[in-house]
Structures are given as structure tokens and as C-alpha cells.
Image: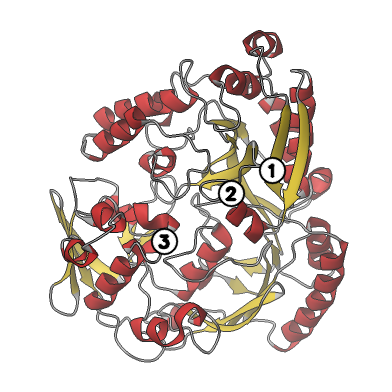
Amino acid sequence: MVKRFLWAGLIGVLAITVAGASFAGNQSSQARTTLRVAIGAEPPSLDPGLATDTTSANLLFNLMDPLIRLGDPPALKALPGAASSWSVRGANVTLNLRRNVRWSNGQPVTAADYVWSWLRTISPELGADYAYQFYGIKGAEAYNGCKSNCGALRAKVGVKAIGRYKLRIQLTSPQPWFVQQLSHTSFLPVNKAAVTKYGNKWTEPGNIVTDGPFKLSAWKHDASVTLVKNTKWRGAKAVKLTRIDHPIIVDGTTAENAFSAGNVDISTTGVPPVDIPKWKKTKFLKIYKALGTYYYGFNVKNITSVAQRRAMAISIDRKAITRYITQTGQVPARGFTPAGIAGGPTITKHSSMPATAQLSKAKSLMPGNAKKSIKLYMNNSPGHVKIATAVQAYWKQLGLDVTLKVMEWKQYLQFLGPPPNSDVDVYRLGWIYDFPDAYNGLVLWTCASGNNNTNWCNKKYDALVNKATKTPNNAARNKIYQQAEDLISGPKGDIPLMPIYWYTFSALVKSNVSGFFINPSDNWDYTRVSVK
């Protein structure tokens, strides 16, 4: 899942300060059941078929009832959600759905809802970036890529309702991670009647139909999102909160001020780097382990030389970036696959990204015809700009003239494509793993991936990732992953991207909030939270 921390300019700061004050008034009358959580961006989409970012995913995780929930780290074991149980026999997975899961309009959620929803996400008409999440299902990739006779291909996709409450899935091969993968938001159902009636407006308050512990009460775009308790949800008796206000506070300093003034209980916007030492001395800054990688991607059509890309990748000081800029326990990334992933140390054994700068070697690698004028794109965050400014200085020592380009988050995602706008030479993004298998990250860089913004396409790499999906033995699969990782970050790799660090998550949390936790996949479960 795409990761981000965002801050905006002065006009946004002033607007949100006013909004924050209005939320403070609501808290006084519902002190024990209302939670106020600052988020750092407008959610681009609350459509499970289209959402690709963590802001949208965390709202969906609480608006909907995932088939599978992930247990506590580090195992992140698959736990029953909307599916009460399941069985796996080779490449066949059968899910038994709970009979007490209902849409917010009172109708039951059935196996047919999942079949319709998944086929919608896979359909070429929707153009979903996450359609590839379904490629492990027989026939899904062919249907997603069809140009003609799509109806026949749709009928061959290996997902079928067996009665009202049993879902049978036929995979292309045994995939040990698939049940955990079902926790991803792209596998959530959508209400056919709502989608059909309201089209692309079906996610607006008053139109949206969901099946989770909370309902969407209000969405003031670019200002706030409000959830209220779904009293009809199957586990509603255990849910303490009746309302969650999410003021959208893009600016980090403004979010800090709102937290300090008591206008929010939790701030997930992110702390500006300059203020991290101050918050470390308090009990409010919470740091959580993560499975994710912060990276810069290269547009290989613009920076065509592998030698130049490698030079740029090894010339930066990752250790200094994590020690002096990010400051919350991030680890310099030697490869794309994080160490916390099962088999991570094996997978990145040959990865060649150094913790400290190798400037002399980098200078020797620079080709005579190197592209000297570089445009580096990022979304609007002081943290991202601070890192980019440091990278700009490192690359200046290679003789590169680097221009920093900053954009608003939603516009930025559109600008990156894929394919990226031709003006992009280098871009910053991050990847948070949706389930604890390296496949979830390595599949990003396949040719057809909706998250490959680099223009890089290597058929050998694709073949390795595909081979891994057909290799159920963990040790053998990790060896294949190692070969794939070598192609992107190894000493003879193509270097379509440069990993910078492996993530941690952080948030400012008031002492009277209990149960708030960010799991390694960046999921927040509000059903566990209470306010004293």
C-alpha cells in the first residue's frame, strides 16, 4: 500500500486551525465516546476497488468488515473476519462467510456480493491499479487485460459463490500467503445497488453502503471525515467509540499545535523533523514497527544509464538521513525488501545499497553522457523536502543540477501514472506491505503493475516473480525472491529505484487514549480503542 506523510502551506494551515477548534467543541459533550484523529491528507478514494493509499485504506478498514484480519506482529497471522473459517486444498480456497454480516442498509452480505465486487475490480473498464492483487486467481489476469470477448474471459475467472455464504476461489497455483492477502482492502465487497445507482458518487455520505463497525457520517472534502458507530454491526457490543472525527491537517506544525491545545487526541499527520527531539522527551510520541520501504524511483526513459542510476543510488548517506532527519528508528535500506519480511535477510543478501555514501565509487561510475539536469518530484511534506534537499546536495557532488518539484498528494499520484509524466526524472514514494510475504513488494516492479511508475520492464524479473507464485516451499521461494531482488538492487541489477530506509510508524497519542495501535501494515483498528 502506498505510504505518505503530508503537510501543506499557510492557507491550509489557517483553514484547518479553525476546523480543529470546531472539533474541540464536540468533544466536551461526548468525552468518553468520541475520538479525534488528525490525518495528513484527503483520502483520494473510499472505493475498495480504487483506493491505493494508506489514508483511504485505514478509513475503509473501519468502515468495512474484511474477510480476514491480521493478528499481532510479527507473525500477522490470518484471523477470522467476515469469513468465519476457511480451508485450503492445494490451489483451491474455500471461505465460509458469517451469516450475521449485514450491509448498513440491513441486507445480508453474501458470497455473490464478493463475486460481483471482485470481478468489478478486475474488469478492464474500472482500470484499477490494484487489479494485479487478483492475478493469483485463475483467469483474473487474462480478464483484466482483455481487449475483446471480455464476457467469456470474465466467466472463466476462478471465483464462485457456492450458495449464499460460501465462496470458492481457484488459484493459479498454491499460494501460502493468499489467505493473509485477503485482508487487503481491494478484496472488500462493494454494494452493487449503491454502485449501480450512484456511479462514481456512491462513496459520498448518504449514498455509501458499508458493512463494518463504523459508518460514514460526513465527508467535508479537504477538511474532515467523520465516522459513527454502526450499532447493527456483528461485534457492536464490544465497540466503545460512538464517533471518530478526522480533521484533515496537512501541515505538521499545525497538527502539533492542535494536539498540544487538546483539539485532537491523536495526530498521525507526522511530526516535522526539527521537532522530533522535543517529542521524544515526552510520553506522547509513539513509535511502531513497520513493514515498508521509503524509496526514490527512477524514470528509466529519462535516466537511461544503469551506471548513472547506480551512481546516484550509492552516493547518498542513508545512515545520516535516518539519524538526523527521520530520527524515529528507521533503518538504512540495503535493498527494497525490508528485513522484517519472512526471509528478508536471505532475499537482500546480495543487495548493494550502502548505509553510508560511496562517493568516490559513484563518481567513477558516472558516464560521460550522463543526464545532468534532474527533476526530483515529491508530495508536499517538510519531511520529504528535507530528505530531498539532502539528496540534492549529495547529487550535486556528482555534477548533477537537481530541481525539487513539490505537489499536492492526490495530484501527485495522478502525475506519477503509471506511466509517469515525462517531466519526472526521479520521484519519491513508499511501500507498506499488505501481508508479510516479499511477493507483495516485488510484484510492484513487474511490467504490468499498476504501481510501477518507473517505466522499467524486465521480462526475466517478471518470470521470477511468476515462478515464485508457483513455489509453495518458503525457503525455495525466498531464493527466487533473492534473484528478483538482485535485478533491482543487486550489484548487477538494473537499479530502477533506490531504497533509502525501512519504515517505522509514529503518532502523537494522548494519555487518555487506550488501545490505539498501528500494525506493521499500517492498519488502525478503532474497535479496540477507548477514551478515558
Measure the C-alpha gap from mark 2 to mark 1: 9 Å
Q: Is residue 422 above or below residue 229?
A: above
Q: Residue 217: horizontal and vertical position, in percent?
A: 58, 85
Residue labelled with disc 1 = 377
Q: Quadrant of residue 318?
A: top right
Q: In this orientation, which residue lies closer to the viewer: 440 or 68?
A: 440
Mark closer to the chain start, 3 or 1: 3
In this rendering, position of residue 363 left or right of residue 24 = left
* Label 2 close to label 1 by CB (< 8 Å): yes
Query: Residue at 25% of width from left, 34% of height from top?
Result: 467
- Which amino acid type is marked by label 3? Gly
Residue labelled with disc 3 = 127
- Farthest residue to the front: give it: 148
* Label 1 element class: strand
Mark closer to the chain start, 2 or 1: 1
* Label 3 element class: loop
Q: How is the image coloured?
A: secondary structure
Q: Quadrant of residue 88?
A: bottom left
User: Mark on residue 416?
Assistant: 2
Q: Residue 96: horizontal and vertical position, in percent?
A: 20, 70
Query: Residue at 23% of width from left, 75% of height from top?
Result: 111
Quadrant (top left, top right, bottom left, bottom right) of the C terminus: bottom right
Q: Is residue 71 visible?
A: no
Query: Residue at 78% of width from left, 18% of height from top?
Result: 397
